[in-house]
Amino acid sequence: MPDLTVESRQVGDVTVICPEGFINAHTVRQFEQSLSRALEDGNQKLLINGSGLAYIASAGLGVIMGLIEETRAKGGDIRLAELNDTVRNIFEVLGFNHLCKILSSEKEGVASYQADTPG
Amino acid sequence: MAADETPTSYRYQEALEALARRIEDPKSQKKLSEVLALLDFNSTLNRSHELTEILDLVLYVTMGETRASWAGVLLRDDGPLKPAARRGRADEQWNGLELPAPEGAPTIAGVGDEEVSEWARGVLTASGAALLVPLVKSELLVGLLLLGDRGESYGIDERLFAQTLCVSAAAAIDNGRVYEELQRLNQRLSLKVYQLDSLFDIARELNRSPDISRVREVLLTNAMGHVLTTRALMLHDGRIVEQRGCALTPEDRVRIEAGSQKLAELEDDVRVAELPAGEVSDILLRLGIDTVIPLRSGESCHGALLLGPRASGSSLAEEDRDFLRSLASQAAASLDNLRLTREFVEKQKIEKEMAIARRIQRALLPESEPGIPGWDIAGINIPCLTVGGDYFDYVDRGDDKHWLVIADVSGKGTGAALLMASVQAALHALAGLGEISLESLTERLNEIVYTSTEGNRYVTAFFATLNAPTGETTYLNAGHCPPLVLRRDGLVERLEEGGPVVGLLPEVSLTTGSTRLESGDLLVLYTDGLSETSSPAGEEFEEERIAEIMRESAGTPSREIMATLLSRVRVFAAEAGLADDLTLMVVQRD
């Protein structure tokens, strides 16, 4: 079984990215490609659904950090939802939860973007 | 809540409340209300661990029962008392309060009390409180509960209530602080575990992918993920090889790369603000880079990792810097390994190619003695590197005539070996054309070498035509060390006739010499690798020693004479070894 598979789907104007497995130094390139591809395709509203994510090493956070500023500058964002306790704990230990919006469910994540849109 | 989970105190509370409804005396009712509040307070305290929650509870309950206009708690670690929580009327003074701890344990004190210590009076004045209640746990002052004005002075009942409450509160506050400290430690421990996990993860990845761009990427994304920064640059071997989140102009790039050496040679990580002022640090500050971590592995400086500030705005803790240093040194070691591996592979490839070249060259030299009837001839070539520029040959010219050839291409190594191969090919081609004099042979070779090397290289050579039955020998010496003939009577003759070296001049004028080799004569041909070999003291082997050895070993087979010459020159060179290609030919009549 591969360390990581990443699938993505479109919910309205939000691109939901579902990594399954481990994001570590070995698989991080794959994770980065899936985010970059979505951004290149013009989708600026990304939601990472972490329900299948077992672990994220710092390299994975580095990828998000490297992309988030530019994405926000274009009016988009990278948000996360449905993180398991391990991943949530990592985010809290590092303080990542203060930099990135974390929602409890995918539905809330998608809704959080709609709340941003005026009207 | 299920019945079995109901705290025992609730039952008492219910009973007390029932009792309160039946008591009509207001004073007793108030007492009962206080007891109820204390009971409630204690049972709630037992369920809270968080310090802020405990403090809130202390403040609300006290204010509720005493009707103080405000209440606050000051806490101390080892030093002064400092504000920790406050409820009620806002007070700007409050946050700036810093009060000295008293000597010994203080007692409860109120404004207007008769016997108030100077310290307590100071606290009441500074805080504007009306009542001070010490929070003491195991005879140690944990903090103070301060109560504001309540319209009337604090009576014995309120004081008793506050004191009773403070006994439980002090213990709970102390526990709360221990709990908080534990949580902090836990948090730090989790961070350490995560850092170690990351280092392990990175090490595994760096070990499995022998690829420089991968090492750089892994290093950069990990560092960014840990520091949580949106900006980073990486310098490697003087170039910016990775960048994230930096608005870098081509000019910035050039300037940073020009100053990269200084960054790579830093001893330790450094804040950009602490770098000596200059163009590079100005650019880095403008790009929002604030930390430089050099990538060093022992003496080799590979480059540097440049990071922006944490997105949270807080500065890097010592633990973060430790992590970044470990990360950087791990990456530097990987880069070192990759460099060594590349060099090793390159070297192996060259060695393999050189071995092939050596095999080819060996095939150009005679495999065995020429087998001329009546003659004992031996020859050997020892290249100094894998391949060399020395050459010797025997060519059967028919009619019992034989060419004996020895030559030395200037320089050594591959270049010399290539030229040696063309000389060999040309010589054999010319030999195949039929009758040719030594002068014509040398002239043609001169032409070929001169045009193919444009006068950059030359060849010293000695050609002889031996008439086997008679021993008559015609020779041409083109700038080569003169071969020596040791006559039977002990005289040594040098074969010098000829002309200049082959290939240096466009045209040459040549002569030949002749001699006759009798039975008992000994001819030795050699290259300067023999005569010019140096001893560790810097002395050369020289022709005289060669002649001496020839005299000593005359009469023994050619192969033995050759072996003696070689072993003597090796002893002479000692640890310095042979520094040039060496070729020898020994010729005797049976």
Image (tube, coloured by chain):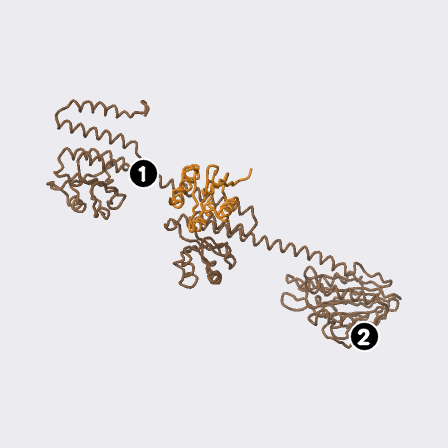
Chain colours: A orange, B brown
Circle 1 residue: B178
Which label is found at residue B93?
A: none
| Left or right: where B589 falls relative to B532 | right
Q: Chain of mark 2?
A: B
Q: Are marks 2 and 1 on the same chain?
A: yes
| Left or right: where B22 falls relative to B9 | left
User: Which amino acid, mark 1?
Assistant: Val
The N terminus of chain B appears in which quarter of the rendering?
top left
How far from the left and from the top, in percent, is residue B43? Answer: 27, 29
Q: Is residue B441 above or below residue A5?
A: below
Which is more N-terminal, label 1 or label 2? 1
Looking at the picture, tell me which residue is in the foreground, B524 or B466: B466
How far from the left and from the top, in percent, is residue B221? Answer: 47, 49
As measured in the structure, the alpha-carbon distance from the residue carrying label 2 to the one carrying label 1 is: 107 Å
- Is label 2 in a helix, a strand or a loop? loop
Of badges 2 and 1, nearer the viewer stands 1
Give the residue at the far bottom of this rendering. Answer: B509
Q: Residues within 10 Å of mark 2 (few under 14, many from 20)?
A: some
Q: Is residue B415 above or below residue A38?
A: below
User: Which amino acid, mark 2?
Assistant: Thr
Q: Is residue B211 above or below residue B139?
A: below
Circle 2 residue: B512
Q: Quadrant of residue B272?
A: bottom left
| Left or right: where B383 falls relative to B486 | left
Looking at the picture, tell me which residue is in the foreground, B349 or B460: B349
How far from the left and from the top, in percent, is residue A66? Answer: 46, 50
